[in-house]
Image: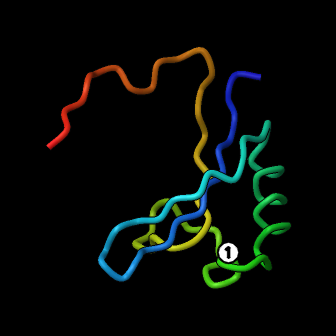
Amino acid sequence: MNSVFVLQHVHTLPGGEEDIKFVGVYSSEALALEAAARVASQPGFRDYPVVVDPDGDEIDGFHISEYSINVDHWTEGFVTV
């Protein structure tokens, strides 16, 4: 296994902030999709039950991202403003 699939759920709060929930990490995209289907009917998730197209404009819903393992994904520092 060289990568994992991270499942998160996002919905936009009235003030415009994104509320992001980390659902889980899976060994395949298919397993991440199955997990999204399992929780899609739960409170909160059911308001935005779709898996978002990564190339689309939609923000609210489930997001699946593939991450290579044993790789630094954030290589620069950060500042707080």
Residue 67 is left or right of residue 2, and the answer is left
Residue at 83% x, 50% y is 31
**What SS does tag 1 mark?**
helix
Total marks in image = 1
Decide if residue 51 is on the left or right side of residue 73: right
- Left or right of 5, for residue 31: right
Q: Is residue 4 left or right of residue 8?
A: right
Q: In the picture, which quadrant includes the C terminus?
A: top left
Q: What residue is rendered at 69% in x and 53% in y?
A: 23
Residue 61 at x, y percent in the picture: 58, 71
Q: Which residue reaches farthest top?
A: 70
Please tell me in which quadrant of the rendered image residue 51 appears.
bottom right
Label 1: few (<14), some (14–19) or many (≥20) C-alpha neighbours in 10 Å:
some
Q: Which residue is mark 1?
A: 45
Residue situated in front as seen by the camera: 53 or 16:
16
In which quadrant will I find the N terminus?
top right
Tag 1: amino acid: Phe
Query: Which color scheme is applied?
Result: rainbow
Q: Quadrant of residue 43?
A: bottom right
Q: Residue at x 62, y 65 (%)?
A: 62
> Outermost residue toward the front?
81
Q: Where's residue 48, x and y in %?
A: 61, 80
